[in-house]
Structures are given as structure tokens and as C-alpha cells.
Amino acid sequence: DTTILGWIHCIRIIYLLVKLILSCALLQELEVGISSHQPSFAALNRTGDGIVQKLSQADGSFLKEKLAGLNQRWDAIVAEVKDRQPR
């Protein structure tokens, strides 16, 4: 029956629209989360750099390596969220 098929089609469209709205809301939430944590992340890097200056060469290199890994993960998160933004 074409009426039932029409309703099924409408329900599918509504489902896809709801998914899109939820995706947009999640993206906005992620963007806000990144923005709100950016100052703390910058402070962490400044503090880490200051501590590195006071450590032995070996300990300073270890901390630098850990900070670099943290920065790579942060940059990957930021890039992933930016990639999901509508163009």
C-alpha cells in the first residue's frame, strides 16, 4: 500500500533529521568543551616548560616527551572536531 510506504519514508526522513540534529548538538558541545579547556591546556604547557627548565637533562627530556605526546593528542582532538564541522 502506497500510504504505508509513504509513512515509512516520512519516518525514515524524520529519523535522519533527528540524527543530524543530535550530531550538530554534540559537535557544538565538543567545540565548547575544547574552547573552555584551551586556557587550562595552555597553562599546563607553560607550567610544564617552566618545570623542564628546573629538572635534570634526563628528567627534563622525559617530561618534554610526555608534554609532546599530550600536545599531539590535543591537536588530534581539535582537528577531529574541526573536520566534523559543516563546510
Image: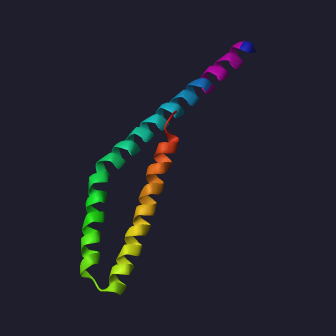
Of the pair 29 and 63, the residue shown nearer to us? 63
Q: Is residue 16 above or below residue 6?
A: below
Residue 58 left/right relative to 51: right
Of 22 and 8, nearer the camera is: 22
Left-right relation of 66 to 2: left
Q: Position of residue 81 (x, y in %)?
A: 47, 46
The answer to if 2 sits in the magenta stretch is no
Where is residue 16? Give x, y as percent.
58, 30
Q: Main secondary structure of the magenta part?
A: helix
Residue 29, located in which quarter of the rendered image? top left
* Residue at left offset 26%, top offset 64%: 46
In this rendering, position of residue 28 left or right of residue 10: left
Q: Residue 41: horizontal and vertical position, in percent?
A: 31, 58
- Residue in the picture at 36% in, 86% down: 58
Closest to the observer, 54 or 82: 54
Instruction: Please report the residue visible at 37 percent of the width from the left and 74 percent of the height from the top.
Output: 64
**Where on the picture, by quarter, is residue 55?**
bottom left
Return the x and y of residue 32 as percentages of the image width and height: 34, 43
Tell me if residue 32 comes above or below residue 75 in the rendering: above
Magenta region includes residue 8: yes
Q: Which residues are magenta?
A: 3-12
